[in-house]
Image: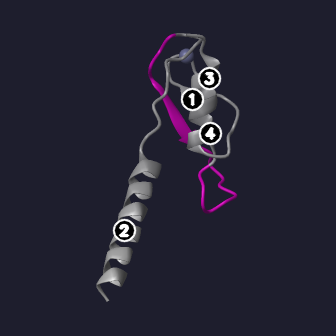
Amino acid sequence: MQAILIFVLVVLLLAADAFIGGSRMAELKKCPFCGSDNVAFTPDEEQLLEDTTTGFIWCHGCDFSSDSFYSEEIAAEKWNRREKE
Ligand SMILES: [Zn+2]
């Protein structure tokens, strides 16, 4: 009986950890075109899928917007890869 309770507890902890990790806002680098750090992930107006949010990165400094990506995570990854360090 006790073993089952511990198992349930571990599963809950793992689920909570995944939830916290998944909802963390992605850190976006500065805009490579104008240097503004006022860049944000902007969800598409029409969402074709329920389990993810498609959208693009929009720079409010120079009005640049990236292509639309499958999720915020992927968009952030592509955006951060774009800028040369
Ligand atoms: Zn910009």
Looking at the image, the residue that sits furthest to the bottom is: 1
Whether residue 13 appears in magenta in the rendering, the answer is no
Q: Which residue is mark 2?
A: 10
* In this rendering, the label closer to the viewer, 1 or 3: 3
Residue 72 in the image, given as x and y percentages of width and height: 57, 42
Task: Out of 77 and 41, give the one closest to the viewer.
Answer: 77
Q: Are marks 1 and 2 in contact (CB under 8 Å)?
A: no
Of the two numbered discs 1 and 3 on the same chain, state the one appearing first in sequence.
1
Kind of residue at disc 3 = Arg
Q: Which residue is mark 1?
A: 58
| Residue at 53% from the left image edge and 36% from the top image edge | 41
Q: Which residue is mark 3?
A: 81
Q: Which residue is mark 4?
A: 74
- The magenta segment is 35-53
Residue 80 in the image, given as x and y percentages of width and height: 57, 24
Of the two numbered discs 4 and 3 on the same chain, state the one appearing first in sequence.
4
Q: CA distance from mark 1 to mark 2?
A: 39 Å
